[in-house]
Image (spheres, grey):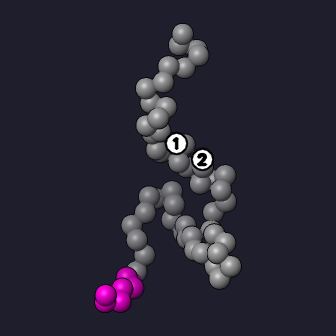
Amino acid sequence: MPKKIPKKGSPEAHEDLKGFDIRINELGEIVSTYSVDKLNDFLDQNVVDKKLDNRVSLEEE
């Protein structure tokens, strides 16, 4: 199999995630420029959870 050629430049990202970088270090730990809480807040605001989309909340009953 041929070797993968590394891509140059930065990938396209959402405007709120400018400067976001995530890597795996030599020990296998995930290293990120943003905190997990900040990422979770972004995902809660911008991504619809398909599992919870059809569920009826307790307030609606």
At x 60% / y 47%, what residue is drawn?
A: 41
Name the foreground residue: 7 vs 9.
Answer: 7
Q: Is residue 5 magenta?
A: yes
Q: Quadrant of the C terminus?
A: top right
**Quadrant of residue 50 within the rendered picture:** top left
Q: Which mark is residue 3?
A: none
Q: Which residues are magenta?
A: 1-8
12 over 58 or under it: above or below: below
**In-image side of 5 versus 40 (left or right):** left
14 over 53 or under it: above or below: below
3 over 38 or under it: above or below: below
Q: From this viewpoint, which residue is outermost toward the top?
A: 61
Circle 1: residue type: Gln
Name the foreground residue: 50 vs 32.
Answer: 50
Q: At which x and y percent is residue 28?
A: 64, 75
**In-image side of 19 versus 48 (left or right):** right
**Quadrant of residue 3 within the rendered picture:** bottom left
Secondary structure mostly seen in the magenta stretch? loop
Disc 1/disc 2 C-alpha distance (Å):
6 Å
**Quadrant of residue 48 within the rendered picture:** top left
Circle 2: residue type: Asp
Q: At which x and y percent is residue 42?
A: 55, 49
For numbered disc 1, what is the local secondary structure? helix
Reading the image, the residue beneath label 1 is 45
Marks 1/2 in contact by CB < 8 Å: the verdict is: yes
Q: At which x and y percent is residue 35?
A: 67, 59
Q: Is residue 51 magenta?
A: no
At x 67% / y 72%, what residue is drawn?
A: 29
Q: Which mark is residue 41?
A: 2
For numbered disc 2, what is the local secondary structure? helix
Q: From this viewpoint, which residue is outermost toward the left?
A: 2
Q: Quadrant of the N terminus?
A: bottom left
